[in-house]
Image (spheres, helix red, strand yellow):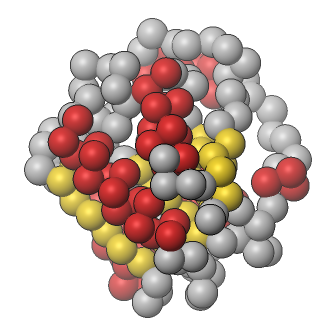
Amino acid sequence: MAEVVLFHHLRGLTDGVRALADGLRAGGHTVHTPDLFGGVRPDSLEAGAALAKEIDERDWSEFDGLVYAGVSWGVMLAQRLAQTRPGARGALLYEACLPVTGEWAIGPWPQGVPVQIHGMDDDPFFAREGDLEAAEALIKSTSRAQLYVYKGDRHLFTDSTLPSYDADATALVLERSRAFLDAL
């Protein structure tokens, strides 16, 4: 079974993010959910973005050698760790993806590190702000990548505590994510 660290989105470590982690745990996997906002639950993405600017970098060595996962804003940390930490076992990127080439890129995707990306085809952030294109470029750069695009226009559709939640899409995300983790 895999060991995963799941980083939350800009609304904080909500019960919906915890439920997503529980969905991964249902497959027998260990999932850590650090609270990067220290218990604060911002009431908007804008408030969360302001809070995120105040967060200090920390030493993530306690999570070396794991699968790195993130939801939306949490993808920035998960993807950076997956691309830069030796021994990364894989990455699950939910509703966001950073470029692997160009000005904002962390660098190329490390060969041998599997990645799975999930997002909606009309999500105002994922589909319309470049994340989908970044995901497609990542997929082309490595043989160990999967991209799943779901019909819909919701952002944070995997968080059951938010109005944007899509139960059917999230069930499919969890099914595919558990299969990904099972194969590691």
| Image: 134 above or below 94 | below
Q: Quadrant of the N terminus?
A: bottom right
Q: Horizontal placement of 15 versus 67: left or right? A: left
Is residue 2 something that shows in the picture? yes
Residue drawn at the location 49% of the way across and 55% of the way down: 27
Q: From the viewer's perspective, is 145 left or right of 168? A: right
Q: Residue at x 79, y 54 (%)?
A: 63
Name the residue located 44 percent from the left edge and 60 percent from the top edge. Answer: 178
Q: Quadrant of residue 34?
A: top right
Q: Is residue 11 left or right of residue 29?
A: left
Where is residue 47 shown, x and y percent of the image?
51, 15
- Establish if 43 lies above or below 113: above
The C terminus lies in which quarter of the figure? bottom right
Residue 77 vs residue 101, the one in the foreground = 77
Instruction: Name the spot of residue 45 as percent of width and height, x first.
Output: 43, 22
The residue lying furthest to the left in this view is: 151
Q: Residue at x 46, y 84 (%)?
A: 144
The mark tally for this picture is: 0
x%, y% of residue 79?
Answer: 58, 59
122 over 118 or under it: above or below: above
Q: Of 24 and 36, which appears nearest the observer?
A: 24
Residue 122 spot, x, y in % from top left: 15, 46
| Whether residue 74 is visible | no
